[in-house]
Amino acid sequence: MKAVYLDNNATTRVDPDVVQTMLPFFTEQFGNPSSAHAFGESVGAALKTARKQLQELLGAAHDYEIVYTSGGTESNNTAILSALEALPDRSEIVTSKVEHPAVLTLCEHLEKIGRAKVHYIGVDSFGRLDIDAYRAALSDKVALVSLMWANNETGTIFPVEGLAELAKEHGALFHTDAVQAVGKAPISLKDSVIDMLSLSGHKLHAPKGIGALYVKRGARFKPLLRGGHQERGRRGGTENVPAIVGLGKAAQLALQHMADEQGRVREMRDRLEKAVLQRIPNCFVNGDPHDRLPNTANIAFEYVESEAILLHLNRGGVAASSGSACASGSMEPSHVLKAMEIPASALHGAVRFSFSRDNVAEDVDRVVEALPGILEKLRELSPFWADADKKSNDSKPVYA
Ligand SMILES: *Cc1c(COP(=O)(O)O)cnc(C)c1O
C-alpha cells in the first residue's frame, strides 16, 4: 500500500519542476554569480529571476528586499541579532511563548548571556496572542518584536500586520517568522510596516538548506555573516545557486497553487477533522477556529500518548507528527499546547496532520479508517480511560 505523508509542516517533497529547474545549475551553468565573465553573468541573471519570483509571492515592493539565507533558522537568527546591533540604545525583545525553537532558543540564550531582556507574550486556549499583554510589553526600550505569522504546530495565524503597526508606535523593528505561512496564506508586504520576514525553502516544495529573509527597504539592518559583497553586503558567502533557482521556481509554483491550497487542501483537512471528531469520543481540535492555515489539523486525544498513536499510524503506512519534529521522541509535551493550557488529560495526546498539494482524498480515507481502531485499542490499555467521562464531540467549542 502507498505510504501516506501527512507531515508537510515538518518538510515537503521537492516539486519535480523545481528539481528540473535546478539541474542545469550543477553542470552547464556552474559559474560564480560574482564573476564578471559570461559564466558568471548568466548565473547572476538566474539569481535575479528567483528574487523576482520571491518578490511576487510576498507582494514585496522591490526584488532587492530579498536576502538569500540557508533557511528559516538562519533568517530568524539574522533578524534578531541584526535588530539588537542596529538599535544599540535598545535591549529588549518582545516575542511569544509559541514561537519556533529557531526564535525561542536564541532569545533564551540572549537572556542568559545578559544581552537582552525578553518578553514572552502568552496565548489563550485557541492559541491567539494576548493583545493586552503585548501592548503592555511595548516601550521605547524594545529593539525588536518577533512574532510568527502562522504556528507550525496548530496553524494558528497571528494578525501580524496589525501587531507590526503597534510595534512601530514605539519605534521598534518588527520581524515575523512566516516559514509556515509563505505559500499557504496570501501575503502582501508592500503596504505593510513589517520590517523583516523569514521563509524557508523546504516548507514550500523547494530543497532543505535554502531560505530567505525579506528586509524592507530602509529598515535598519546589520549582517550576521560578514564576508564578500554578496546580497549587497547583507549576507556574505558564495550563493547556493541551484537551491536559490529552485526556491524561485517553488515560489512561482506556490502562487499558481494558492487557490488549490485554500480550496482542495482545506477541504481535505476539514473533512479529516470532522470525521475524526464524529467517530472518536473525547478529542478536540487545537488552534484558532477562525484564523488557521488551511493545511494543518492538530487533534488532541484524551487519555492516550501521541507517540503510541503515531507508532500505530506509521505501521499502517501513515506519517504524521506530534508537533514540532524537534520535540518528538522526547516525552516533554509541546510548549505550544502548554502555553494554550489545553486540558492535562489531552496534553500528551496531540497529533498533527499537515497536508500539502501532494495529498489526495484517499489519504484522508486511510486515516479515518485507521484511527478509531487505534484509539480504541490504546484506550483499553489506559487506566485513566476506564474512569473517564466519555463524551461525544458535537458541542466542542474549539471546533469551528
Ligand atoms: C521549519 C520552521 C523553521 C526552521 O526552518 P529551517 O529552514 O528548517 O531552518 C522556523 N520556523 C518555523 C515556523 C518552521 O516551521
Image (cartoon, grey):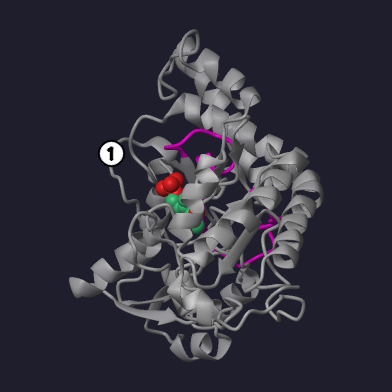
Taking 337 as reference, is 48 above or below it? above
53 or 395, nearer to the observer: 395
Taking 143 as reference, is 270 above or below it? above
The spot of residue 215 in percent (x, y) is: 51, 54
Q: Quadrant of the C terminus?
A: bottom right
265 or 50, nearer to the observer: 265
Residue, disc 1: 227
Q: Is residue 274 left or right of residue 232?
A: right
Q: Is residue 322 left or right of residue 89?
A: right
Taking 69 as reference, is 266 above or below it? below
292 or 359, nearer to the observer: 359
Q: Quadrant of residue 206?
A: top right
Residue ID at (66%, 71%): 281
Residue ID at (51%, 85%): 134
The spot of residue 189 in percent (x, y) is: 65, 58
Q: Quadrant of the N terminus?
A: top right
Question: Visible in this render: residue 181?
Answer: no
Most frequent secondary structure within the magenta stretch: loop
User: For the residue labelled by badge 1, is the local secondary structure a helix, a strand or a loop?
Assistant: loop
Q: Inspect the magenta stretch and tell me whether residue 201 lies in it.
A: yes
Residue farthest toward the top in the current orientation of the protein: 28
Residue ID at (44%, 74%): 383
User: Badge 1, how many Cα within 10 Å: few under 14, some, many 20+?
Assistant: few
18 or 394, nearer to the observer: 394
Question: Visible in this render: residue 332?
Answer: yes
Q: Inspect the magenta stretch and tell me whether residue 366 lies in it.
A: no
Q: Amino acid at mark 1?
A: Gly
Span of residues in magenta? 183-210
The spot of residue 313 in percent (x, y) is: 54, 47
Q: Is residue 23 left or right of residue 271?
A: left
Q: Quadrant of residue 190?
A: bottom right
The spot of residue 111 in percent (x, y) is: 25, 74
